[in-house]
Image: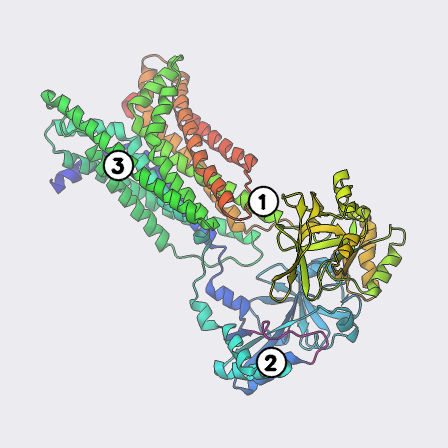
Amino acid sequence: MSIRLVASVARRFMRSRSLARSTFLVAATAALLVAVFVTLNAFTLSPRQVTDRDLGRFDSQVDLSNVTTIRPGSADVAGEIAAAARASGASETVAALVSFDVRPDMTQPPFTLYTEALWPAEPFPDRYQLRQGRWPSQPGEVAVTDALRRVLGPIESFTVFSGNDRLRVVGVAEDLFGDTPRILAAQGTWASLSEATSRNFSTVLATATLLWNGGVQQHVLTAVAAVVASNVPEASPATVEAQLAAETRTRADELTKLRRPWTDRIPLAYDLPSLALPLLAVLTVFGLNARRFRKSLAILTSVGMSRATATAGVAAATTVWTLAATLAGILAGIGLGAASRPVADHFLAGPISPWPGLVAPAARLLGVTVAACTAAALLLHLAHPRSTGAAAPSRAPSARAGKKRTRVTGAAVRRIAATVLGVAIIVQIGVLDSVEEAMVLTATVAATVLLFTPEVVGIAIRLLPTTDPRSHLGRKQLHNDRARAVAAVAVLTTTLGAPLGLTTLLATLITTAQEDVVATVAPHQVVLSGPGGAMQPPSRDVVTAVSARLADAAPPVKTGYLTTETVHVTVKDAGIGAVLVVETPEQASRLNNGPLSDAQLQTLQRGGLLVWNEGPDQRQLLSHDLTSDRVVATSPPLPAARAAFEPTWTSGVSGLLLATTAQRLNLAISPAAIVFTNVTDDQATSAEQAAIDNGLDPLQVGIYQPPEPITVPPAYYTAVLGLAAIVLATTMAVARSQVITLRSYLGRLIAIGLSPRWARHVLLIQNGLIILTSTVLAALIAVPPVIVAAIKLRGFTLSIPWTWLLVITAAFYIATLAASVASSRRLISKDRLTA
């Protein structure tokens, strides 16, 4: 094979405008893949950003939350810890206190984080920036972040812990890494909190974090462990030191720690498409030009050129154009990524990451392109007989036989590959236990479906009606150039299947997570409980204060549980939830916010119980020893009725019975929450305000708040939008390439007297068949893996977002129609001469 001859053939083919235009699909795919890569990586903080956020200007940090907690008004333990670290050789130390329990006094306050530190020293200069006033320096002084300032307004001070303490606002700061409301308190503020706060808010705690520069880490930890052990009598310094060593972070370690990017967390968004789409785009280029390549190879071999030389020339020209298109797409993708980063920054509460390295995605795209061109060239060489009818008429039958054998061999290879992938799918289903594995399963299913694309396209072509002359011509032309249709269907199926699959999986994840979120208090109820929740009785002061505000309400329901300090009672075959106890069936109906059925009421009155799960009509109660969890007693069978009860009261509860039933069975009842029912929203707000006005813990007065909607990381939405953009761009590129490839054919139709509109109808029929087939195959790729995941993954609830799937599919069809019409609107008869 002559290199010079190959180069000459390649140069000749590189002049083809239709070949050059058909590679637009490659450029569009590469551009959008690079843009998705750049945008998704913007959501992953770099190691330096994480270090700036968590360690500030310090070299080391140790979290003491596992070894000690600090009550309000306690001695300045944080100061002791910092002093011990300095004495051990640390050159600069800050002991920061963090609490989740400090909130402004208001009904339904926002979730607020309290952080106490030596703020004038600016321990976190790249995280908190002062916008107004000054940093707090005296106990009781605070700076608030912008997010909390928007809630409180321009105030000089505000109260916390139901008016027992007042904090003076001396500054406003911006948290560059989030929008959670924060209180930045001066050192010593926690120790200065009032005795009333410590008395009335028994669950309020703070944890300490030590940050330091210099010194020997081991010496610092030894000194800190000694201070902690002196405040925790049951802890030994050696044990505490070992725990602290496990919680220590250093700047050097954090800067070298790899952060998992979103491109790895969502394989269906970039990793898998970046392998499949460039490959399919290249094969589509060869498929779109397959008929022309066959004719050219036949001519070249008829004049004596070897088959290998002719194929190498054609493949070299196509490879050069596809590589050029890939490079152009990479450059365009960098531009698109640069444009998308400010948009991502706008929707992120924190900063976006620095620009990611682009060598890896560029090398991947170029490598896949070269590999795809090589594979396509090999297929092109093997797919045709080595002699043509023109050159050797007598050998035509053997040529056809060779071609048939090649096709049979290709079909056999595809069947073998499909069998292997089928086995892989079975194995993947067997071990499926994560969302990422579900995405990989989707890719495996996609590869399997694509292997049967030629057969599916053949069936679709045969099903195309021939009653109309235009559909007859479209069917005949597709039949004669089936490789073009197969290539187009393959790439469109993949591009459409990815967003459909990811959207379905995302909807399932959101639905599953949302179902697990239950309101802590049922609607139209006020629950008075102890600091530990509904299984503890409220304090007498809380009951008195709230009862005075709700004097017009019905008498409250007093609840209890069959749980003591030594025994925990459950319903057999109903999980490990506790058993709820009320006095009367009417009280059970009030907790349910609706009447019980006659059968349920009769069951309770006959000494039975209500359960939430399916099961036998009689159930037993199991008494478990709390220390060993061993069943120490079993009740006789009791009548049981299944009830669809108010979800708030079924969470962590396995059943409900009456107090008389428990007493008959000699089961101890521990008093629990007191519940006011059928209250209005104003009454509920007034009840919470009553606790605040009396200096009591408002968390002991539970009122209904709708569950917060699940927060989905913006990277998921970005991935869906990126894949949808790839769908639209690929669809339009394929439709445009179809017109370019068929320009000569359509031009001949116009030249013999048919109108351009008639010719466009032929084109639209072909494109319609292609996208309809692609839609069916994409649905086969997208939905079944999610159904399997919903079955395999525990607690998964399948949710198919029909609206969004229809929107994506409709955009897919509209883009195809628009691109087809726009590309074919100038078809004229001379196109047969200029194609």
Residue toward you, 549 or 639: 639
**Quadrant in which the N terminus appears:** top left
Look at the numbered disc 3 and give the secondary structure of its residue.
helix
The label shown at residue 511 is 1
Question: Who's the residue at 60% across and 82% down the image?
Answer: 229
Q: Position of residue 131 (x, y in %)?
A: 64, 65
Q: Spatial distance from mark 1 to mark 3, Cα to Cα? A: 41 Å
The amino acid pointed to by label 1 is Thr
Crowd tier of the residue under label 3, counting other residues whose Cα lies within 10 Å: few below 14, some 14–19, many 20 or above: few
**For the residues bearing labels 1 and 3, Cβ distance under 8 angstroms:** no
Residue toward you, 367 or 785: 785
Outermost residue, bottom direction? 87
Q: Spatial distance from mark 2 to mark 1, Cα to Cα? A: 44 Å
The amino acid pointed to by label 3 is Val
**For the residues bearing labels 2 and 1, Cβ distance under 8 angstroms:** no
Question: How would you classify the magenta stretch by its main secondary structure?
Answer: loop
Q: Position of residue 109 (x, y in %)?
A: 73, 58
The label shown at residue 228 is 2
Q: Can residue 636 be seen from the camera position used here?
A: yes
The amino acid pointed to by label 2 is Val
Q: Position of residue 118 (x, y in %)?
A: 63, 76
Does residue 205 appear left or right of residue 659 in this picture?
A: left
Q: Quick one: label 2 or label 1, which is nearer the N terminus? A: 2
The label shown at residue 612 is none
Does residue 494 appear left or right of residue 151 in this picture?
A: left
Q: Position of residue 294 (x, y in %)?
A: 22, 28
Q: Quadrant of residue 589?
A: top right
Q: Which residue is mark 3?
A: 413
